[in-house]
Image: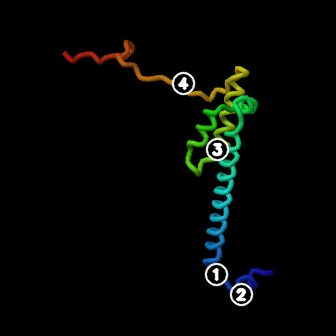
Amino acid sequence: MTAIAKLLLPAAAPGAGIAAAIARTLAWGVRQFATRIRNRRDLARLAHFDDRRLADIGLTRGDLRGAVCGSLWDDTTLSLRARALEQRLSRNNIEIGLKLPVSSPPLAPCDDVVTPLSVR
């Protein structure tokens, strides 16, 4: 189709694109919400496991409690995966260097601070 022929076609309704974008966004939100609900059901199934079975997959009861304490919009599987990976790495004495050094400011003034000379 030539450029002139395209100009002669009637323009699409300007609201159609906006409506399609809103529909896609709502559909995505519904899918995400359904996924979160399914993950919470799976978490409830994990809660019925005994401690030995949870340890086999690298989790503890505290990990399950921590995952369920988040909001409904939080994905519980992300926190459980991170916790299981953290425990697996610490069991094998592997550090990946993500821990930030924690240092607090000194309570007393440091000796290395140079004080300005007094004016004569």
Q: Earlier in the sequence, mark 1 or mark 2?
A: 2
Report how far apart the C-alphas of labels 3 and 2 lie in the structure: 54 Å
Q: Earlier in the sequence, mark 3 or mark 1?
A: 1
Numbered disc in front, either 3 or 1: 3
Quarter occupied by residue 31: bottom right
Q: Which mark is residue 13?
A: 1
**Residue contact between numbered discs 3 and 1, judged by CB atoms under 8 Å:** no
Q: Amino acid at mark 3?
A: Thr
Numbered disc in front, either 2 or 4: 4
Q: In the rendering, at what x and y percent does residue 28 appear?
A: 66, 61
Q: Name the quadrant of the N terminus.
A: bottom right
Residue at the spot of label 4: 101
Report how far apart the C-alphas of labels 1 and 2 lie in the structure: 15 Å
Q: Could you tell me which secondary element the residue under label 2 belongs to?
A: helix
Q: In the rendering, at what x and y percent does residue 25 appear?
A: 63, 64
Residue plotted at (71% across, 33% down): 50
Q: Amino acid at mark 1?
A: Ala
Q: Which residue is more in the foreground, 115 or 63?
A: 63
Q: Could you tell me which secondary element the residue under label 3 belongs to?
A: helix
Numbered disc in front, either 1 or 4: 4
Q: Which mark is residue 8?
A: 2
Quarter occupied by residue 18: bottom right
Q: In the rendering, at what x and y percent does residue 96 appear?
A: 67, 27
Q: Is residue 37 above or below residue 49?
A: below
Report how far apart the C-alphas of labels 1 and 4 lie in the structure: 57 Å
Q: Amino acid at mark 2?
A: Leu
Residue at the spot of label 3: 76
